[in-house]
Amino acid sequence: MSSSEPQHVTAIVEQLLAEHADRVSLDQVAEAVGAAPITFDEIELVLDRLEAAGRRVETEALDPPAALAKVLATVRSFSALSGRRPTLAEIAAHSGLELGEVRFALLYARVLTR
């Protein structure tokens, strides 16, 4: 651990290393992150630390554009009906996607806007 590494990053990495012997999916990373306030640079640090420890970080076979389209449609319809933005759990429940798929779609959207 670097002295400049945030404690929550260290905790996430240690949890994933303890739970997964050789491969870690992005869904598993998303589950470990949960609702922690984490930046994209810190997510990259988590992935770098996992790979440096010999873990392969892999994505599930997803269709990111299709998942993102479902997420956006769900957010629009939910917001129109409720007058507020849905939580990630609400997006998952109303879109039929798993919570990890919602997070992955939103991460995909951020990558697209870079």
Image (cartoon, rainbow, N blue to C red):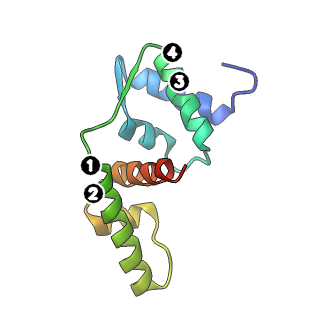
Few, some or many residues within 10 Å of mark 4 (<14, 14–19, 20+): few
First reached walking from the N terminus: tag 4 or tag 2: 4
Residue type, numbered disc 1: Asp
Residue 98's spot in the image, x, y percent? 30, 53
Q: Residue at x 35, y 71 (%)?
A: 74
Give above or below for 83 relative to 110: below
In front: mark 2 or mark 3? Answer: 2
Label whose residue precedes the other's in the sequence (2 or 3) = 3
Circles 1 and 3: CB atoms closer than 8 Å? no
Nearest-to-viewer mark from 1 and 4 = 1
Q: Label 4's element?
A: helix
Q: Residues within 10 Å of mark 2 (few under 14, many from 20)?
A: few
Give the quadrant of residue 21: top left
**Could you tell whether 77 is left or right of 37 in the image?**
left
> Distance between the Cα atoms at labels 4 and 3?
6 Å
Q: Which residue is mark 2?
A: 66
Assign a secondary structure to mark 1: loop
Estimate the spatial distance between the alpha carbons at disc 1 and disc 4, rounded to whole Å: 28 Å
Picture quadrant of residue 82: bottom left
- Residue named by callout 1: 63
Of badges 1 and 3, the one in the foreground is 1
Q: Which residue is mark 4?
A: 52
